[in-house]
Image (tube, helix red, strand yellow):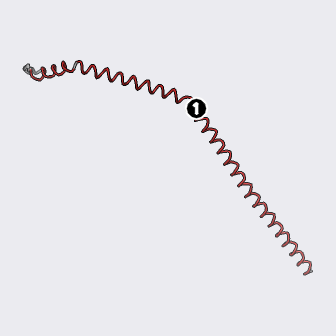
Amino acid sequence: MSAQNSQGIQTLLDAEREASKIVQKAREFRTKRVREARDEAKKEIDSYRQTKEEEFKKFESEHGAGNKAAEDDANKEAETRIKEIQDAGKKSQDQVVSDLLKAVFEIHPTPHIEV
């Protein structure tokens, strides 16, 4: 009976070792698969990023020229208006100075009336 118990224990130990090997292989397989999935996802992300960057560069080149032209037009218009304002200021500069001096030197005193 003791030999039978010993053989039964040995069979259980062998089964436990075999189960341990199967579990270890499953862990290794899972770890390997996780790494492969991560690498695959990284490649997909890089590919997607590259595609979107190319789309953005294309969009920027197509629409950037229009913005540059509009910006140049706006700058030209602003320069023209500034020049007009400066010219108007130069034309009436003498009159403005004269009016200011007249307002300062010609005093018209008026009595203060309380209401």
The secondary structure type at the circle numbered 1 is helix
Left or right of residue 21, residue 73 in this image? left
Who's the residue at 61% across and 37% down the image?
54
Left or right of residue 95, residue 9 in this image? right
- Up the image or down, 19 lies above or below 37; here it is below
Left or right of residue 113, residue 31 in this image? right
- Up the image or down, 7 lies above or below 100; here it is below
Residue 72 place in picture, x, y as percent? 44, 26
Left or right of residue 24, residue 11 in this image? right
Who's the residue at 57% across and 29% down the image?
62
Q: In what quadrant of the picture does the N terminus appear?
A: bottom right
Residue 76 place in picture, x, y as percent? 40, 24
Who's the residue at 60% across and 39% down the image?
53
Amino acid type of the residue tagged 1 in the rendering: Phe
Who's the residue at 44% across and 24% down the image?
73
Q: In what quadrant of the picture does the C terminus appear?
A: top left
> Pointer 1: residues within 10 angstroms few (<14), some, or many (20+)?
few
The residue nearer to you, when weighing 31 against 5, is: 31
The residue nearer to you, when weighing 110 against 76, is: 76
Q: How many marks?
A: 1
Residue 23 place in picture, x, y as percent? 78, 63
Residue 114 place in picture, x, y as percent? 10, 21
Q: Quadrant of residue 103?
A: top left
Residue under circle 1?
A: 59
- Up the image or down, 85 lies above or below 28; here it is above
The residue nearer to you, when weighing 111 against 106, is: 106
